[in-house]
Amino acid sequence: MGVECPCGVLVNAVSRRNNVRFNGQMGTVRGDLMYMANVCVTTLDTSSLSLQFTDTETMGGVNSFTFTANSITSVVCNREGQNCEVTVTGTGLINGVQFPFEAVFRDQVASANVDIVQSFVITGFFDQNGAAPVAQGSIVALGCQEN
């Protein structure tokens, strides 16, 4: 078994029918978000994170994109009651152009609660525009367990 991660997050989540914002565009665009992450503070160089947005509103899905982190610079875990919130920052690429990002994932412990992507901002390009609910168990925070 590998070394336990003192702070990180595993994400395999989809949130459908979200109204997101793009820099330089008026209003919002509706679409589906797919989040993938395998991030640990002790192995930032081998951590991975991506966001895929599928534009379901615009003819031809012109706003669809895939963002892939190419450098994860910070992972912060905060315990909030029974829940754990993990903030990941760094830079990533969209069509070869680099942007800074900040993603906040919230692992809700209670099985009745959905997990939440609290925010995902790609500076100068995209903002998911508020919290996005995802299926319970699709976000697994590492490092907030009670000892």
Image (cartoon, grey):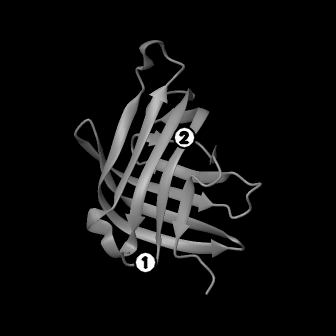
Residue drawn at (43%, 75%), measured in percent from left and top? 5
Picture coordinates of residue 79 (x, y %)?
62, 75
The amino acid beneath tag 2 is: Val
Q: Could you tell me which quadrant the C terminus lies in?
A: bottom right
**Above or below, 50 relative to 139:** above
Asked whether residue 23 is in view, the answer is: no
Depth-wise, is mark 2 or mark 1 nearer the camera? 1
> Residue reaching furthest front?
1
Residue drawn at (38%, 73%), measured in percent from left and top? 41
Picture coordinates of residue 98 (x, y %)?
27, 47
For the residues bearing labels 2 and 1, Cβ distance under 8 angstroms: no
Q: Nearer the viewer, residue 105 or 139?
A: 139
Residue drawn at (47%, 46%), measured in percent from left and top? 35
Quarter of the image for residue 97 reads top left
> Residue reaching furthest left?
96
SS of the residue under disc 1: loop
Mark 1: few, some, or many residues within 10 Å (few <14, many ≥20)?
Answer: few
Quarter of the image for residue 95 reads top left
Q: Which residue was labeled with disc 2?
A: 14
Picture coordinates of residue 93 (x, y %)?
28, 45
Q: Which residue was labeled with disc 1?
A: 4
SS of the residue under disc 2: strand
Picture coordinates of residue 132 (x, y %)?
62, 45
State how far apart marks 2 and 1 are (Cα): 26 Å
The amino acid beneath tag 1 is: Glu
Q: Nearer the viewer, residue 18 or 23?
A: 18
Residue drawn at (61%, 68%), measured in percent from left and top? 84
> Residue reaching furthest right?
112
